[in-house]
Structure formats: structure tokens, C-alpha cells
Image (cartoon, rainbow, N blue to C red):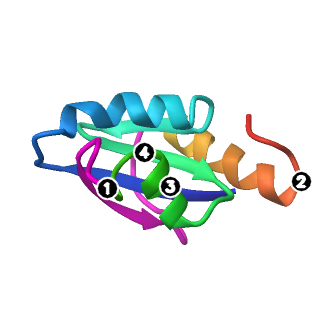
Amino acid sequence: MTIFVVVSQPNPNEMNLPGAIIRAFPNDHLGIGDKVWLIASPEPIQEISKKIGVADGTNGAAVITEVGSYQGRANPNIWNWIKSKWEATSNGQASQ
């Protein structure tokens, strides 16, 4: 699966974004900070934006980027989540 980073931006509807992410990707999202989430999906970035209500602004504004690689220091749960989602693609597995 592809992993996307969603960073919420100030907007009158921004309080709707967390719930939209949870509903659209119940088993394929991970909050990693204040108003920052990872989403794993095989869909293109435009579909991610539509599904979480960013494309039309219904659920706020956000910057959405596709992850190509990663590095840093963080909670091991974050690294485990990323690894499992990327391995799901290489092993032909469905969402976990």
C-alpha cells in the first residue's frame, strides 16, 4: 500500500477531519502528532483527498503527501505500522 501523510491546516471545518479519516480508513490510519496522520491506501492521492473531505473543504484543509521513504526517531509503534503497511503490498495482503 502507499502511505500518505495528512497535515491539517487552519480552517473553519478542521474539527471534522479526524472523524472523516477514522470513518474512511478505520484500519489504515495512524495519528502521529497534533493534526498529523498517516493513511495507508492503494488509491491515488486525489481519492484520499476526496474521501476525507479535503478536496471540497467539507472537513477542512490539509496538505497530503505520498511517502517515498522515511527516517527519524519516533515511537516504535510508528515504525512498526509503516513497515506492516508497506509489507502488506509486497506480500499481496489486504488492509490490516
Question: Which of labels 4 and 1 is toward the front?
Answer: 1
Q: Amino acid at mark 3?
A: Ile
- Give me the residue at 45% from left, 54% from top: 50
Task: Give coordinates of residue 38: x percent, y percent.
Answer: 46, 47
Q: Magenta segment, principal secondary structure?
A: loop
Inspect the image, locate mark 2, and give the three-letter code of the amino acid beneath it: Gly
Query: Closer to the N terminus: mark 3 or mark 2?
Result: 3
- Amino acid type at image mark 1: Asp
**21 shown above or below 55:** above
Label ID, residue 70 = none
Instruction: State the residue at coordinates (29%, 52%).
Output: 7
Tell whether 40 sits left or right of 19.
Answer: right
Disc 1 is placed on an element classified as loop
- What is the CA distance from the residue labelled 4 to the residue labelled 3? 6 Å
On the image, numbered disc 1 is attached to which residue?
A: 56
Instruction: Tell me the number on the disc at residue 48.
Output: 3
Q: Is residue 84 magenta?
A: no
Numbered circle sitting on residue 52 = 4
Q: Earlier in the sequence, mark 4 or mark 2?
A: 4
Q: Nearer the viewer, residue 60 or 26?
A: 60
Q: Which residues are magenta?
A: 56-74
Badge 1: residue crowd in 10 Å (few <14, some 14–19, many ≥20): few
Residue depicted at 50% across the width and 55% down the height: 48
Between the residue at mark 4 and the residue at mark 1, the CA separation in whole angstroms equals 9 Å
Query: Mark 3 and mark 1: span between their CA atoms?
Result: 12 Å
Residue 63: within the magenta?
Answer: yes
Cβ atoms under marks 4 and 3 closer than 8 Å: yes
Q: Nearer the viewer, mark 4 or mark 2?
A: 4
Q: Which mark is residue 92?
A: 2
> Which is closer to the viewer, label 3 or label 2?
3
